[in-house]
Image (cartoon, rainbow, N blue to C red):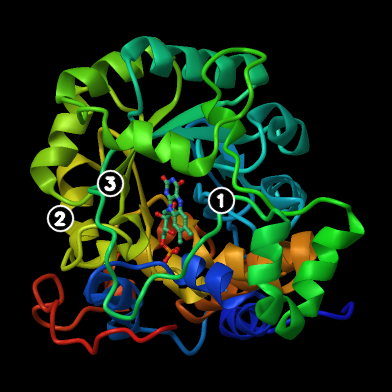
Amino acid sequence: MGSGWFETVAEAQRRARKRLPWSVYGALVAGSEKGVTLEDNQAAFAQLGFAPHVAGLHYERELSTTVMGQPLSFPAFISPTGVQAVHPDGEVAVARAAANRGTVMGLSGFASKPVEEVVPANPQTFFQTYWVGSRDDIERRMRRAREAGAVGLIATTDWSFSHGRDWGSPPIPERMDLRTMLKHVPQALTHPRWFAEFAKRRRIPDLKVPNMREQEGAEAPTFFGAYGKWMFTPPPSWDDIRWMAEQWDGPFMLKGVGRVDDAKRAVDAGVTAISVSNHGGNNLDSTPAPIRTLPRIADAVGDQVEVVLDGGVRRGSDVVKALALGAKAVMIGRAYLWGLAANGQAGVENVLDILRGGADSALMGLGKSSVHELDRSDVVVPPDFESGFGGVETVGAG
Ligand SMILES: Cc1cc2nc3c(=O)[nH]c(=O)nc-3n(C[C@H](O)[C@H](O)[C@H](O)COP(=O)(O)O)c2cc1C
């Protein structure tokens, strides 16, 4: 084990908190309003129990599966996040880590690295897009991703522009020019390693979003410029979702589904997969954890489309719980961001190893030889689990 190795995602998060300036750490904690959803996403997993066996366990266990035609060495992959100034290599480091561990990279449309640099680092890349601009703009963005070699598209359409947090939002500078650097001197002094990483590469962190470029060859817009355009774009209809799936004409995921009726509409719109998700609790607060709504959605559409889940996954046993309740795989967000902040690419690999090891261990305890054998009898679901949302403590500053 090299230096910098950590044993759990919680430890990676502790290191990230120590290492990152408060403004960057706070942007990754994210959440919205009271943080009820942010907290429930993890709390709900903890309410589920296991029903393990004591003999007849399997020495060898199969963890691999496929999602949208892509093989995964175990049923977890990278959920798209606008990585911001976590690490100078950003999404390229995450993509390499995912490739080294045999899993898919989800690349955010608001990422800091262009899709043309990320796909070579991991040919199993799904490109994620929001509904920003005109159909022509969106079509151009999809074409660019396809030409770069992305093998799937993730459409995220659940964003509701909620910006307030009871614990306060950190100021995120648009660009680290000299003036903002000076303003951040106290944070630089208390987080020297983070600043040193950028200084070493003579690259100061900025917040550009190259995948949102208006035209080929045009300069990448800033995060806030692109965000403004998004805010003033009328949100998509179900016809627009169908149009997108048709235009993409390949493996297509609708991310953010939380209701059975929406899941059925997504099927009608021609999607390949849905992600049961509430955007990691960053969105409409008081939305229940996806693990609570997963079973009903999987029952309704699981035989027609692939159902994945994201939100609150921090350990391998969470992966197994989600599979037992009907998901084909999960996507992870903060878990890998903490790994990236703690130890770069090796930190992301470390997180994937933790999840894989934990999933394998749970599978062993449950007496299963394959992730494909998991079912509801493997978990103890408390009464009112699906509606038992709300009695949770609110979140603090992280
Ligand atoms: C800092 C941050 C940025 C995110 N940016 C995006 C994004 O650009 N596109 C997207 O579809 N989801 C985005 N998400 C949501 C994640 O893809 C995912 O749904 C969520 O993080 C899952 O919850 P978890 O962090 O508990 O694993 C973001 C989440 C975080 C924490």
Element type where label 3 sits in the image: loop
Tell me the quarter of the image containing the C terminus. bottom left
- Please, what is the three-letter code of the amino acid marked with disc 2? Arg
For label 1, the crowd category at 10 Å Cα-Cα, with few meaning under 14, some 14 to 19 and many 20 or more, is: some
Asked which quadrant contains residue 101, the reply is bottom right
Q: Which residue is labeled 3 in the image?
A: 159
Asked which quadrant contains residue 277, the reply is bottom left
Count of numbered circles on the image: 3
Q: Give the distance between the C-alpha atoms of the residues marked 2 and 3, in whole angstroms.
A: 23 Å
Of labels 1 and 3, the one closer to you: 1
Nearer to us in this view, 199 or 31:
199
- Please, what is the three-letter code of the amino acid marked with disc 3? Trp
Q: Is residue 106 left or right of residue 73?
A: left
Q: Can residue 101 be seen from the camera position used here? A: no
Of labels 1 and 2, the one closer to you: 1
Of labels 2 and 3, the one closer to you: 3
Q: Which residue is labeled 2 in the image?
A: 296
Q: Give the distance between the C-alpha atoms of the residues marked 1 and 3, in whole angstroms.
A: 21 Å
Nearer to us in this view, 248 or 296:
248
Residue 241, given in percent of the width and then of the height, sits at 25, 23
Q: Is residue 337 left or right of residue 201?
A: left
Q: Which residue is labeled 1 in the image?
A: 174
Q: Give the distance between the C-alpha atoms of the residues marked 1 and 2, in whole angstroms.
A: 42 Å
- Please, what is the three-letter code of the amino acid marked with disc 1? Glu
133 lies above or below 162? above
Q: Residue at x 63, y 43 (%)?
A: 112
